Image (cartoon, helix red, strand yellow):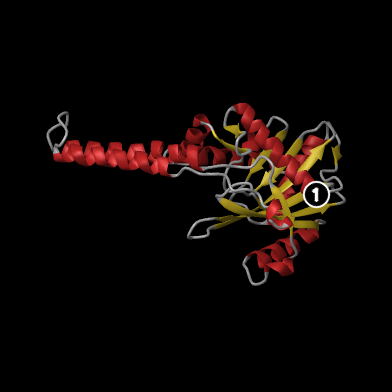
Amino acid sequence: MTSEKQQQEPRTPTTRPWIGRSVLWTVLLVYLMWCTGSVPWAPPTTMLNLSIALLFLWFVYYWICIAVALRFAWWGSPQCSCEPFELDQLGATALSPRIRETMSELEPEGFLPRVHFRVFGLTPVFIEFNSLFENPQTQGIAILATYVAQTAKRQTTTFVSYCSRFNDGCEVWTTNAPWTFPHQLNKDREVAQFPDIQDLNRLHRLHQSMVDRKEKSVGRCAVFGADPIDFYRTMLSKDVAREVEKGVYFLDSTEEVCRFTWKGACLCVWNSKWPIYLFRLSKQKRQAKKLLQSLKPIDTSF
């Protein structure tokens, strides 16, 4: 008889990473047969032909095999689970000092900690730790997000986002996140990304200047309800539902998870690879610079 804890544990969906590897090894085998002249349609073995074949192999792996593996191996949960924790529970890990440092930087701005929680069951790619803060005076919130990659290097990415909500349902987000989020395409959210700004006080001033411009037409309202974790879970669920409508994800009813469509897998891989990634990064920096110039009379730290 299973215990209550085991019954509440989410079932790990099946993954099929062997499909991407099979495609890669098949292409590699064909390439070796081509180089050795083992196939009747192989061209003469010259340095030019070998270079073209190697370039083609790189293209297939870089742009196709990874997308195929992502299509079949990745999964995400439309309903994630959140587990609150205390800072003392983190012990000697690197997360606790970072959270305490952020708390000391946000306190002069009027932000008070509401809850710290771990998000699990969302995706097997990383573990997410969040700390939510609230400013009673401005009715704004701050989110410290830490993503720990489930790889051998255990790479950790940390960033802070400010959010303010208005009576018309719109939201203004200001973040120093290094990557782009799906909710940036949401028409009800205005998102400004400044990945080079690590000073949280300056980032908050930029956020307030954006909020002040918006608040001239509509008033702001509180972001959190009675349960901050429920707010975050609802926000993620809406983001996933929005991506399903766009055709990026599809719901796998057999395992109750969402997976990438072919469109979503290709867009996710291609947007993060060279050279498209360089164009996207350049566009992001131009947009940030243009926004900084428009806010320059307000922010005196430029």
The residue to which callout 1 is attached is 228
**How dense is the environment of label 1, judged by Cα within 10 Å: few (below 14), some, or many (20 and up)?**
some
At horizontal 66% and vertical 41% (from top left) the residue drawn is 192
Q: Would residue 300 be seen by someone viewing this image from the given angle?
A: no
Query: Where is residue 135 drawn, in percent x and y?
Result: 83, 52
At horizontal 80% and vertical 39% (from top left) the residue drawn is 165
Q: Is residue 76 left or right of residue 25?
A: right
Q: Is residue 190 left or right of residue 195?
A: right
Q: Would residue 267 be seen by someone viewing this image from the given angle?
A: yes
Depth check: give the residue in front, 106 or 46. Answer: 46
**Residue furthest front in the image:** 1
Q: Give residue 96's quadrant in the image.
A: bottom right
Q: Give residue 221's quadrant in the image.
A: top right
At horizontal 76% and vertical 37% (from top left) the residue drawn is 171
- The kind of residue on which mark 1 rests is Pro
Question: Is 127 placed above or below 47 here?
Answer: below
**Residue furthest bottom in the image:** 92
Question: Is 126 placed above or below 238 here?
Answer: below
Query: Where is residue 48 drawn, in percent x and y?
Result: 17, 37
Q: Is residue 43 left or right of residue 200?
A: left
Query: Where is residue 264 drawn, in percent x and y?
Result: 53, 33
Query: Where is residue 80 drawn, in percent x and y?
Result: 68, 46
Q: Secondary structure at mark 1?
A: helix
